[in-house]
């Protein structure tokens, strides 16, 4: 039973440390995990009085022992958290540098013309518009190894109390809809200038049920057009004007003299695909498949493996890509062949751009208008500054599909086990990578922290204190201090087997008649001494025989016999005294 309780507490602590329940703060879950582990060890360490003559510990464990054990576990957990928070990134950088020295030719060097997401550059040199390349054209890569950079590129501050972390963060810069021969192109659109009213550019007239307001900070594109960086389904932006140059793609006005980076507020209403959604109507370009019969056939064959209505089939597309294809920053695709066909048929491994391209074309094959979007996903949240930081290595491509309501929704088919892409929370003592000239104090105005609110913190603190009190009470019940022994057999005597009841009665009786049994004297020697004094009991030989049989022989102890000896010894004691 004790082992079963220990297994349950270890399992509960494991679930807490793995992140369940999701809504609980990480500190609360860690503290509760430690308390549960200590409680399980306390129950497991509580033993009943041993019935055998096997040597027992000098003393049972006490509450201070378990408190020390719990503190040690907490320290070990803290060291593990510290190690896993810092070591992986350092080790990754060392391994990457070492690998680059060994295989310099397999790495794609960071530059403005690099097709691989997340490569190269210095802090805030660009806003990620190196993806755009100023020509509305993107060619699939995959021949070399992608080297993601850790450079911070975009800073985002949530405004109000909207649940940013729960919805997931995707920052979009542009979309493309025309695909042919490993190249994505933006859908042609007559450029349109959107002017502001009272400093706000209204992008959409739709009034959504839920919307997210946030502030964005990023550098300009030093090579040309600087695009707006926003969450998908943009509603409005606080700026003097915007230039719409492609669907969902907006060019920012030039920076004013003396300014080095863009900073603006925006409001969006991002939505995610669910299988109960139905496809919407759109321009034919959003449904076109590649003209290459081999590529078209590969797409249609994969789509044919899905079943159900359009929404269910599209949901199965994500499962298909996750189960049969591998995410890799070194896909080793053959540049002399069709890269998408290589990805789908031969290598079956690639990075986000390959998954997004395949998902977009598969969505069209099951009836959903689709396009590909570029930007970032994930972000690291810093509570002290109420700020998300997106780095170059979090650059991402994903699919967007049009649904019956006329909205474009996010459909990300890239496997979730890639290195980046999920929102993370920095430690309290971790400083954000703030560029020179960025005043964080401005970002705190009207802030609503994504951490636990004061009331929730008070509840968590109360729960922790109450849990500690309950733990202390339970430990006090299980670990009552044993009564001090009244025997006088000297230090360490508790390490010996407990004395036999009839032997103790014999010692007491001889002491009462004036013939105490000294330390080290055996039962046989004591009975011989009593015979010399003519004080030996009539049952002495019987007692001696039984004692040697149960102590050194294989005869089991008999409770009835020992009770009879104790009664005889008491009667003999009364006669002698």
Image (spheres, rainbow, N blue to C red):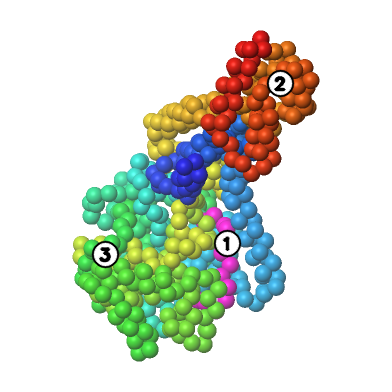
Pointer 3 residue: 275
Task: Name the foreground residue: 276 vs 220.
Answer: 276
Q: Disc number at residue 565?
A: none
- Crowding near the residue tagged with mark 3, few <14, some 14–19, many ≥20 C-alpha atoms within 10 Å: few
Residue 240, image x, y percentages: 37, 51
Residue 149: give its label.
Answer: 1
Foreground label between 3 and 2: 2
Q: Residue furthest top?
A: 577
How far is mark 2 from mark 1, CA to CA?
95 Å
Is residue 485 in view from this perspective? no
Residue ID for mark 2: 536
Which percent across, then down, holds residue 131? Answer: 48, 67
> In which quadrant will I find the C terminus?
top right
Q: Residue drawn at (34%, 80%), measured in percent from left and top? A: 302
Instruction: Determine the secondary structure under disc 1.
Output: loop
Secondary element at tag 2:
loop
Q: N-terminal of the two: label 3 or label 1?
A: 1
Residue 478 visible: yes
Relative to 332, 284 lies left or right: left
Q: Residues within 10 Å of mark 2 (few under 14, many from 20)?
A: some
- CA gap between label 3 and label 1 equals 35 Å
Q: Nearer the viewer, mark 3 or mark 1?
A: 3
Farthest residue in the bottom direction? 293
In this view, the residue in front, 50 or 35, is: 50
Q: Residues within 10 Å of mark 1 (few under 14, many from 20)?
A: some
């Amino acid at each position: 039973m004790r082992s079963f309780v220990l297994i349950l507490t270890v399992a509960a602590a494991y679930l807490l440390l793995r992140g369940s329940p999701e809504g609980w703060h990480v500190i609360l879950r860690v503290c509760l995990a430690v308390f549960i582990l200590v409680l399980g060890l306390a129950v497991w360490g509580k033993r009943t009085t041993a019935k055998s003559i096997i040597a027992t510990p000098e003393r049972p464990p006490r509450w201070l022992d378990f408190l020390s054990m719990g503190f040690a576990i907490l320290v070990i957990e803290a060291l593990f958290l510290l190690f896993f928070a810092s070591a992986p990134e350092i080790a990754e950088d060392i391994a990457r540098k070492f690998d680059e020295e060994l295989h310099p030719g397999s790495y794609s060097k960071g530059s403005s013309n690099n097709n691989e997401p997340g490569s190269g550059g210095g802090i805030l040199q660009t806003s990620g518009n190196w993806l755009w390349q100023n020509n509305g054209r993107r060619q699939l890569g995959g021949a070399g190894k992608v080297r993601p950079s850790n450079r911070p590129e975009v800073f985002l501050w949530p405004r109000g109390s909207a649940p940013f972390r729960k919805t997931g963060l995707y920052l979009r810069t542009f979309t493309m809809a025309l695909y042919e021969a490993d190249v994505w192109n933006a859908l042609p659109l007559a450029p349109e200038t959107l002017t502001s009213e009272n400093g706000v550019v209204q992008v959409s007239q739709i009034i959504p049920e839920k919307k997210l307001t946030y502030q964005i900070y990023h550098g300009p594109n030093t090579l040309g057009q600087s695009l707006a960086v926003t969450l998908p389904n943009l509603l409005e932006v606080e700026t003097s004007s915007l230039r719409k140059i492609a669907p969902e793609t907006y060019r920012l006005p030039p920076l004013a003299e003396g300014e080095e980076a863009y900073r603006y507020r925006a409001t969006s209403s991002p939505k995610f695909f669910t299988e109960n959604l139905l496809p919407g109507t759109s321009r034919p370009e959003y449904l076109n498949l590649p003209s290459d019969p081999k590529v078209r056939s590969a797409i249609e064959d994969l789509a044919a493996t899905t079943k159900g209505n359009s929404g269910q089939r599209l949901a199965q597309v994500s499962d298909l890509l996750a189960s049969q294809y591998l995410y890799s920053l070194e896909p080793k695709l053959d540049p002399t062949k069709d890269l998408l066909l290589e990805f789908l048929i031969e290598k079956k491994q690639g990075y986000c751009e390959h998954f997004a391209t395949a998902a977009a074309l598969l969505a069209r094959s099951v009836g959903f208008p689709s396009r590909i979007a570029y930007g970032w996903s994930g972000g690291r949240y810093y509570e002290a500054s109420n700020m998300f930081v997106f780095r170059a290595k979090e650059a991402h491509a994903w699919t967007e599909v049009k649904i019956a309501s006329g909205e474009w929704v996010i459909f990300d088919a890239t496997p979730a086990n890639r290195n980046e892409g999920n929102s993370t929370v920095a430690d309290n003592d971790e400083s954000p990578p703030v560029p020179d000239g960025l005043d964080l104090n401005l970002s705190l105005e009207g802030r609503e922290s994504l951490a636990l609110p004061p009331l929730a913190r008070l509840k968590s603190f109360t729960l922790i204190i109450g849990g500690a009190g309950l733990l202390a009470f339970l430990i006090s019940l299980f670990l009552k201090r044993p009564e001090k022994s009244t025997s006088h057999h000297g230090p360490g005597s508790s390490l010996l087997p407990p004395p036999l009841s009839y032997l103790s009665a014999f010692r007491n009786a001889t002491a009462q008649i004036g013939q105490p049994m000294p330390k080290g004297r055996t039962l046989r020697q004591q009975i011989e001494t009593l015979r010399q004094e003519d004080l030996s009991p009539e049952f002495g030989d019987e007692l001696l025989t039984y004692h040697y049989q149960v102590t050194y022989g294989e005869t089991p102890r008999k409770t009835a016999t020992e009770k009879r000896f104790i009664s005889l010894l008491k009667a003999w004691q009364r006669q002698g005294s």
